[in-house]
Image (spheres, rainbow, N blue to C red):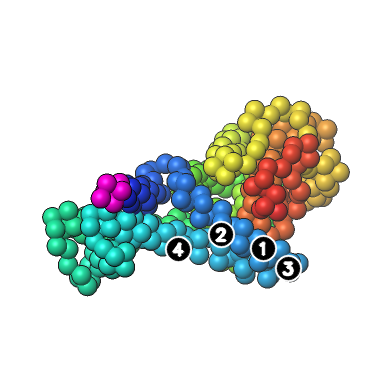
Amino acid sequence: MKAESVGAVAAFAAGLFVAGGAVASSVVTVVLPRGVRSRLGRFVFFSMRIVFKLRVRSSTSYSTRDRVLALYGPLSLMVLLGAWVLGLLVGYTGMFWGVGVHPLRHAFTISGSSLTTLGILAPKTLPQIVLAISEAILGLGELALLITFLPSIYGDYHRREHEVTKLRTEAGNPPEGVNILIRLHRLERLDARTQTWVRWIDWFVVVEDTHSVTPVLSLFRSPAPEYSWVTAAGAVLDGASLAASCLDAPRDYEAELCIRTGYLCLRRIAGIFNLPYDADPSPSDPISVTRPEFDEVYGRMAEAGIPLKDIDRAWTAFAGWRVNYDEPLIRLATLAEAPIAPWSSDRGLLEGRPLTLLERIRR
């Protein structure tokens, strides 16, 4: 008899722990307005990442990889929602068994009945009634969270993609920062570049806020395979860096603010995924863009007739700006498996820094 009592208490405690963990995960993910990831959420997304990486590992076709990986974010999110419901179902099964609902099949049935409010089995004792009511309330709460959570996520997603799609008219496809300046110059609107930087300052603020609160958004791919929020961010930051360093014009304060807003955004998102980067780089630290690559872009601007500073001074200033976002940009492009774009997703991970276990799995 004593052993049965101990078993009942242990079952109730274990069920309470499981159900509480599911509720806590949903609250942290949906309700808490900050980027805190629950253990359950990390486990689900990490496990799904491994499954998808195994699925596309043997494929060398980018179109195939993109088609498969496009399912990763939404499907992982649905699995997480299912994990919350399953946690409640399993947890309450243990608690019902602990208060005397035997055998286990009956405990499972009454738990499912309470969670879905189907009323298949009715509780008999007061503790069972309390558990049934509390599970029904939590089940309805999870449903309410689902109803509000998904529209919120997709609203944030579409706000992000609106600017990403618009960028193709300014930066080309794939996007290049130098194209922004060349096209504005050809339209005799180079002085209006500040409007572009201000628009993207707002975009970086929104992306940092939404993607730090809901990190899975970072892995939601764009509607078109050739678009990516990461390569778009890189192109804008490169365009602002080229404007701040190369143009023979008064100081471009908006460009500098855009760079700072952008690298703070990328760093925060990279930090959520535990991607390593130097938080306080020196302007003289090496960057992934080589001097010949910069010279080629400088030559394109000169050929277009854009007034430019001395090339050596411009290179030093550009490298000093680029170093602030170089590593987070490349690591996020690798994480998101972004389509090939100059100076972002076409770079490899930086050398001189060992890969973590998570990065090796992602690769």
> Sequence order check: which comes first, mark 1 or mark 2?
2
> Sequence order check: which comes first, mark 3 or mark 4?
3
* Prevailing secondary structure class for the magenta stretch in the rendered image: helix
* Mark sitting on residue 78: 4
Q: Secondary structure at mark 1?
A: helix
Q: Secondary structure at mark 2?
A: helix
- In magenta, the rendered stretch is 1-6
Label 3 sits on residue: 59
Residue 222: % across, % down:
57, 62
Q: CA gap, disc 1 to disc 2?
A: 10 Å
> Sequence order check: which comes first, mark 3 or mark 2?
2
* Mark sitting on residue 48: 2
The image quarter containing residue 105 is bottom left
Q: Nearer the viewer, residue 66 or 236?
A: 66
> Sequence order check: which comes first, mark 4 or mark 1?
1
Residue type, label 4 = Met
Label 1 sits on residue: 54
Q: CA gap, disc 3 to disc 2?
A: 18 Å
**Residue 149 to residue 199: above or below:** below
Q: Secondary structure at mark 4?
A: helix
